[in-house]
Image (tube, helix red, strand yellow):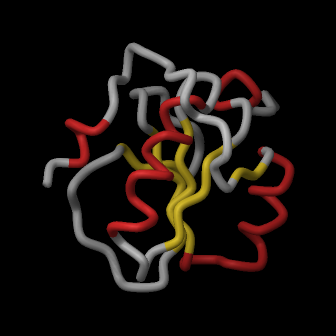
């Protein structure tokens, strides 16, 4: 399975609701708690500090992938597709996407 075929970087899906989601504030709080057991995933080619581009790269089990896109629609859809297929990983949708990223 190619993860890059599961969403479009240019389109934000209206089917994103109902996913497990964190705000950016929650992400930064949980980042302190989780350390290296979480990975911030850039799905749209707009990296922020500490993010990695989406890829098919393998990761250790029990890692938490935090996905962001534009307003979080596509990342929510992808999170819902991946969660049942990879139950040994945790997938979280960043609510508001890159548009809600706190510029500092």
In which quadrant is the N terminus drawn? Answer: bottom left
Residue occupying the point 80% across, 32% down: 102
Residue that appears at 61% across and 32% down: 72
Q: Nearer the viewer, residue 81 or 69?
A: 81
Q: Which residue lies furthest to the top in this view?
A: 10
How many marks on residues? 0
Quarter of the picture containing the C terminus is top right
Question: Residue 13 placed where, x, y %?
Answer: 50, 23
Please state if 87 lies on the left or on the right of 93 as rendered. Answer: left
Query: Horizontally, is 80 left or right of 8 in the view?
Result: right
Quadrant of the rendered structure where residue 28 is?
bottom right
Q: Which residue is drawn at 84% across and 64% down?
A: 29
Judge left or right: residue 95 versus residue 29: left
User: Percent from the top left, x then y, of residue 25?
Assistant: 85, 49
Q: Which residue in the rendered view is the most extreme toward the left?
A: 1
Q: Residue at x 49, y 31 (%)?
A: 74
Q: Is residue 101 left or right of residue 49?
A: right
Q: Is residue 53 above or below residue 37?
A: above
Answer above or below: position of 66 versus 62: above
Q: Position of residue 98 (x, y in %)?
A: 63, 28
Residue situated in front as seen by the camera: 57 or 80: 80
Q: Quadrant of residue 18?
A: top right
Q: Where is residue 8 in the image (x, y as percent from the top left)?
A: 33, 24
């Amino acid at each position: 399975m190619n993860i890059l075929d599961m969403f479009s970087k240019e389109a934000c899906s209206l089917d994103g609701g109902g996913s497990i989601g964190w705000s950016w504030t929650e992400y930064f709080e949980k980042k302190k708690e989780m350390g290296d057991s979480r990975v911030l995933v850039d799905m749209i080619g707009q990296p922020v500090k500490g993010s990695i581009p989406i890829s098919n790269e393998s990761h250790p089990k029990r890692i938490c992938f935090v996905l962001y896109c534009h307003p979080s629609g596509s990342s929510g859809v992808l999170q819902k597709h991946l969660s049942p297929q990879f139950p040994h990983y945790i997938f979280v949708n960043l609510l508001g996407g890159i548009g809600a990223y706190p510029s500092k």
